[in-house]
């Protein structure tokens, strides 16, 4: 069955530290993968997406993600976190005509 | 700037009431979606629509119905609200085509409380 797993429910990092949010997927074919961010009280905003080609994808707000087929992973990274990055992050894979979302990772940033 | 708007940010209703959640997009998108978001469960698809007057069930359609009379508007209806429908409801739209790899644009959400 198609699924997405975000193993970390909460992550806390200090401002300026690096960040990696984990995402593992289960999908038979080549997946289409997305990362979305949801700031408090807001809807979801697309950070980046992977369809094919270069496995390292650059997104908005200084985020990047790397697709690793051998590990069925699409982890999100940022070299230096800003206080404004505090939000909830969702990984998604495209299933048959619809998105399948992970359960989200809530990021807290310490000043 | 693309926009998906939802009629209410917060809504409080009583058990048994009929509830309408409205969503409007200004991007001429053919595809529209309704999700509910609950802590620890992520986003779950309730219903979606690829065209006017067309609807398809998502993963959790029980207790809900939808209406798409105009391209820009997609309504979610709770025929008889129950407390287990207390949740955040998110509407989304995406560009034409049945391919789900199109980016979805989300509204700000409606937080519904059923007492």
Image: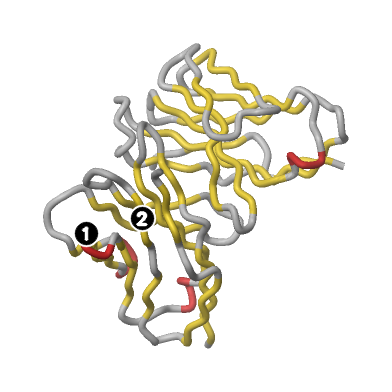
Q: Where is residue B62 in the image (x, y as percent from the top left)?
A: 66, 28
Disc 2 secondary structure class? strand
Q: Residue at x 48, y 43 (%)?
A: B106
Residue shown at 47%/14% (left/top)? B54
Q: Quadrant of residue B18 in the image?
A: top right
What is the count of numbered marks?
A: 2
Vertically, is B63 above or below A4? Answer: above
Q: Where is residue A70 in the image (x, y as percent from the top left)?
A: 21, 63
CB under 8 Å between callouts 2 and 1?
no
Q: Determine whether, in the image, residue A84 is placed left or right of residue B11.
A: left
The chain holding disc 2 is A
The quadrant the N terminus of chain A occupies is top left
**Residue pictured at 33% horizontal, 31% vertical:** B95
Decide: few, some or many residues near mark 1? Use Cα within 10 Å; few <14, some 14-19, many ≥20.
Answer: few
> Which numbered circle lies on residue B10?
none
Q: Position of residue B78 (x, y in %)?
A: 72, 27
Q: For mark 2, what is the residue?
A: A25
Q: Residues within 10 Å of mark 2 (few under 14, many from 20)?
A: many
- Between B91 and A105, the one lying in front of the other is A105
Question: Mark 1 — on which chain does it sit?
Answer: A
Q: Nearer the viewer, residue B76 or B100?
A: B100
The residue carrying mark 1 is A69
Q: Is residue A34 above or below residue B104?
A: below
Q: In this view, does B84 lie above or below B47?
A: below
Instruction: Answer left or right for B49 relative to B97.
Output: right
- Residue A105, horizontal then vertical, whole percent: 50, 66
Mark 2 or 1 closer to N-term? 2
Residue A102 in the image: above or below residue B97: below
* Quarter holding residue A73: bottom left
Question: Helix, strand, or loop for circle 1?
Answer: helix
- Measure the alpha-carbon separation of dots 2 and 1: 10 Å
- Picture quadrant where residue B113 is located: top right
């Amino acid at each position: 069955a198609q699924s997405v797993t975000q193993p970390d429910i909460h992550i806390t990092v200090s401002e300026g530290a690096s960040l990696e949010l984990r995402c593992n997927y289960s999908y038979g074919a080549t997946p289409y993968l997305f990362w979305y961010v949801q700031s408090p009280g807001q809807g979801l905003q697309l950070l980046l997406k992977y369809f094919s080609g270069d496995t390292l994808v650059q997104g908005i707000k200084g985020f990047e993600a790397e697709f690793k087929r051998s590990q069925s992973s699409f982890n999100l990274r940022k070299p230096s976190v800003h206080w404004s990055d505090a939000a909830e992050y969702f990984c998604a894979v495209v299933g048959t005509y619809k998105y399948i979302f992970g359960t989200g990772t809530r990021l807290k940033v310490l000043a | 700037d693309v926009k998906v708007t939802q009629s209410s940010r917060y809504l409080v209703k009583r058990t048994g009431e009929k509830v309408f959640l409205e969503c409007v997009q200004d991007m001429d998108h053919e595809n529209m979606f309704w999700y509910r978001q609950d802590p620890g469960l992520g986003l779950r698809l309730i219903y979606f629509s690829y065209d006017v007057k067309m609807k398809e069930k998502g993963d959790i359609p029980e207790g809900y119905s939808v209406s798409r009379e105009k391209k820009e508007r997609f309504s979610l209806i709770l025929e008889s609200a129950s407390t287990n429908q207390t949740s955040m409801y998110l509407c989304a739209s995406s560009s034409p085509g049945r391919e789900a790899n199109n980016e979805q644009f989300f509204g700000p959400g409606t937080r519904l409380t059923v007492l």
